[in-house]
């Protein structure tokens, strides 16, 4: 392909692309573009997105995971900007943890900027996020960046055209081709096709729905289903979806208005998101339709539509509290219709199904996607959307992002069916550094050792594998603590050792087991007189003997802790 | 309906039907049929099934759950038999825990009996399970029981026709109508229809797949897919399914034989089940085809089919160990094809998807039902199968069983579409007692307070809510232990309090926090001199003050334990 031929290539330097998150997994998106004019010196860095990830199931007690930016620590002065593609948590929500350290300007479309500022304010940070228009060309040293509007499950989502001295990168994070989006704004296919005429070196493409054949349905297809549900609803119409899904909320509002129902918003994240997006005119409804939560009981059920958090059965969400009869202002009653307009996130299926069960038992009709068609469509493109993006961009190289490894592999198979060769497909693992040179070749130069930076409460990164392993052990079998009091000087055991346990057995009913355990401890304490006692060794003895004894008796392995107290 | 009219009804007594498990949930199946000639005295009890359930996600460390048989404890001498419908764990596997207490004869079809005996032997129990033929009529006092062969995902599955003085019950546990089952034995529809002519009082029916429209596909439909996968497989053909799914294993064997591959079985439960079912001729293959696991590496990959446990990504299963490179005799390599012929059980989706990711990364092609059609069919009937059963039995009353409450409700909606009235549909919660009288009326008389009997290691029922709550707290935020040594007589604090924590923070890096915590403890110990010290109160003070301090500093709530040691 002649457009890629460049006789002066040796002077163009190189671009290194480093996924710090979002490669081999769906969330925690963060990509580093690094330019070097000469091979040894980084001149400029551009970062795309800065999102959170969800903890794995064995990361007990961990609230969320953020990208590991160790690699960037000694290069902060080279970072020109962080550019955000859209306002979802897995693309923006790690900023409050990372921006205070990096201190660089942040850019995004109008809604993305607004949502990011709100997120930063929640952490007491008052950084301004620069608003970018679709006509703007941003210049950051050797990088120039243009935004391409794409349809997704949040308004104002964008892909990025990143021009560099070695070629053009099309940063195709989350998108689908929805020709009838709720806000009327289609994906800017013209802009993409026009860029392709200049020759795109590498397409980075969303791949999470590659396993679904065909095209993802339009958001519009849902409104008809909602209309039918609300028209036949003999009680309150209760609607839940992800709080960032502004288009979906607009659709619920539309059918409520059409059917003369007042609207109440319940749950902090829905209320917050509705407030911000409405102020910016991404959400449209008359003030007089809104009912304050405290007034809900004053209205007839058939006059009400309630838009509520809890589509993933989050423990303290408004819908969960309503279902359990613990919400102060709203309840679920026979005749009510509850519509789940979101699919369960993997790992949340059981919780969602249990919630549906409770709602059903309280007499409501529950509509969810297992039994009702067209209640939810994804914001991500299916196989044909993804193929269309390849067709539009016609890149030299393709790198699937934002999906698991099996989805990346599946995406690669699809691209091969379209004529691409293995050597044109880049399937890196997190932390692998892909270097593009002026001859339009790429190679993987090294792999960074990235850690899971876990956030638990106010602690960021202070939870490591030791703490996690202890939590896992205690979750499974509890803890047993032995306290041995000894005399400071003589080392004599001054009183009978004490045993305390939590989460292991019900102590009051386990007298014999504990008596026998005490004997094991006493035996472990039979020390030779007069010798200098190595208490470290004695403690290990006690713990080892107890572990063996308890496993034999109970087939459980609690965490065992022996404490020697000098008095 | 005249067949139900009975002028002598007042003398017929009553039958009470009590779901001890399996109503409102899919597993833990156990049903009590209780006959009373006069209202005050139980004369005879018949039990159907005795299965285990899976623990909820918040039951940390619990291995399994069994039915609560408290209700039966003072009625043991009335129990005539336990009759088993089929050999799945959720129908037989609680027997080793319950049979030693109830000591009653157990009945099942040939394979069910054999699998149950193996299960009992695992616990050192050598009870004989009576084998029942399809022509047999068992008599247990006023009950007579006939077995109806049904197709399901295990051979030799049965429904039960239970005749009683007040009417006929059709006990329709797990079934589908598969007209081309692998063993050639179809559901005995003739026997069902003939019984219907006598008038069936109540149909208990499987309902778990009522949300799926149409009929469940035949098991046969899978063989073609397997055939295609193995024919195009350039390496080892690795096949995983649930180890009880004998028909599926037979199909994998069939395609292996056809394609001239030797077969290795890996994983304890597959090996055990293959051994038992083959001995009883439910599984058919020539000895000479079998490869011992130790010999696997001697064969060319293309000469091998490996049938392996781990379809749910169980932590130490053979497939998991192969994927992680930790299996002694077998590995996964580029060119291998891994076929998942089982859908993830709800709650296991993430684990299965992670396993698929690891397998993909090691270069294997992975076929699973998200991307490949006809790799798995359910053993349970879909909506039309369930409707057909209603059509065949034409019962007066219907009670959906073996499903969640939303599925029961959905089943009821389907039955109403077929002309049934609300008053003919029985949707009890676990433990509700449904009483049928001689006039063919029913009422719910009371509700038993059933507990979750949790099994953890060797302990059965010794884990209660207190232990579980402690496990949850420690799983989320760990534990912090304070030891205060005091002098036996004076009550004086003899040394500085000690702080130990596990799973809370990494102690070595938290010096300042611990120093401050120590100050909180010392302040809590500033006691008035000379007063009698209430150590119980002091401990509560320490724990309360520490909790407040730690939450403020870390937003975590570890379990806090203060121990006063008298020396």
Image (cartoon, coloured by chain):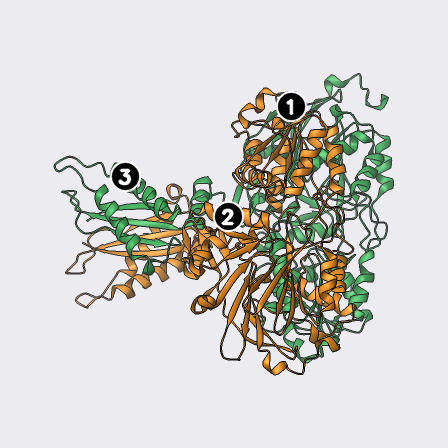
Chain colours: A green, B orange
Label 3: chain letter = A
Q: Which residue is mark 1?
A: B301
Residue A90: x percent and y percent?
Answer: 64, 46
- Under circle 1, the secondary element is helix
Residues A136 and B69: in front is B69
Q: Which residue is mark 2?
A: B117
**Distance between mark 1 and mark 2 Cα atoms:** 37 Å
Label 2: chain letter = B
Quarter of the picture holding the C terminus of chain B: bottom left
Asked which quadrant contains residue B107, the reply is: bottom right
Judge depth for marks 3 and 1 and give the one in front.
1
**Distance between mark 3 and mark 2 Cα atoms:** 42 Å
Q: Is residue A73 above or below residue A474?
A: above
Q: Are marks 1 and 2 in contact (CB under 8 Å)?
A: no
Q: Is residue A279 visible?
A: no
Q: Which residue is mark 3?
A: A541
- Under circle 2, the secondary element is helix
């Amino acid at each position: 392909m002649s457009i890629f031929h460049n006789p002066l290539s040796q002077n163009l330097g190189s671009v290194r692309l480093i996924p710090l998150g979002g490669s081999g997994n769906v969330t925690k998106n963060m990509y580093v573009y690094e330019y070097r004019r000469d091979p040894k010196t980084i001149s400029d860095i551009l970062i795309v997105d800065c999102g959170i990830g969800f903890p794995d199931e064995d990361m007990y007690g961990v609230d969320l995971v953020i990208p590991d930016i160790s690699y960037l620590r000694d290069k902060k002065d080279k970072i020109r900007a962080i550019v955000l593609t859209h306002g979802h948590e897995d693309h923006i929500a790690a900023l409050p943890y990372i921006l205070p350290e990096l201190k660089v300007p942040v850019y995004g479309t109008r809604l993305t900027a607004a949502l990011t500022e709100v997120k930063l304010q929640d952490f007491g940070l008052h950084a301004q996020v620069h608003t970018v228009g679709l006509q703007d060309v941003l210049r950051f040293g050797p990088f120039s960046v243009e935004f391409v509007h794409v349809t997704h499950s949040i308004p104002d989502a964008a892909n990025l055209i990143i021009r560099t001295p070695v070629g053009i990168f099309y940063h195709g994070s989350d998108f689908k081709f929805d020709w009838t989006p709720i806000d009327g704004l289609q994906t800017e296919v013209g802009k993409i096709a026009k860029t392709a005429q200049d020759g795109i070196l590498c397409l980075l493409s969303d791949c999470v729905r590659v396993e679904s054949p065909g095209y993802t349905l339009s958001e519009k297809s849902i409104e008809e289903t909602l209309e039918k549900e609300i028209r036949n609803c003999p009680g309150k119409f209760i609607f839940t979806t992800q709080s960032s899904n502004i288009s979906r909320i607009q659709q619920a509002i539309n059918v409520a208005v059409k059917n003369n129902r007042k609207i109440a918003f319940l749950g902090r994240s829905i209320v917050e998101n509705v407030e911000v997006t409405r102020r910016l005119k991404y959400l449209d409804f008359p003030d007089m339709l809104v009912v304050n939560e405290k007034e809900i009981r004053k209205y007839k059920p058939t006059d009400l539509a309630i838009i509520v958090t809890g589509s993933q059965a989050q423990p303290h969400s408004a819908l969960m509290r309503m279902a359990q009869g613990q919400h102060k202002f709203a309840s679920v009653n026979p005749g009510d219709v509850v519509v789940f307009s979101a699919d369960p996130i993997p790992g949340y299926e059981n919780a969602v199904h249990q919630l549906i069960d409770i709602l059903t038992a309280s007499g409501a009709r529950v509509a969810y996607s297992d039994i009702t068609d067209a209640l939810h469509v994804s914001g991500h493109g299916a196989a044909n959307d993804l193929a269309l993006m390849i067709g539009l961009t016609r890149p030299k190289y393709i790198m699937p992002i934002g999906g698991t490894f099996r989805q990346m592999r599946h995406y690669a198979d699809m691209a091969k069916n379209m004529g691409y060769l293995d050597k044109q497909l880049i399937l890196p693992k997190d932390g692998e550094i892909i270097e593009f040179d002026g001859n339009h070749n790429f190679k993987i130069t090294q792999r960074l050792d990235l850690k899971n930076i876990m956030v638990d409460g106010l602690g960021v990164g202070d939870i490591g594998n030791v703490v996690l392993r202890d939590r896992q052990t205690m979750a499974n079998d509890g803890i047993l603590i032995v306290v041995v009091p000894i005399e400071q000087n003589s080392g004599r055991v001054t009183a009978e050792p004490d045993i305390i346990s939590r989460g292991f057995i019900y102590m009051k009913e386990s007298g014999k087991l504990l008596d026998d355990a005490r004997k094991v401890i006493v035996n472990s304490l039979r020390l030779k007189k007069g010798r200098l006692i190595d208490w470290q060794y004695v403690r290990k003895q006690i713990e080892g003997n107890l572990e063996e004894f308890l496993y034999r008796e109970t087939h459980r392995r609690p965490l065992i802790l022996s404490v020697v107290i000098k008095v």
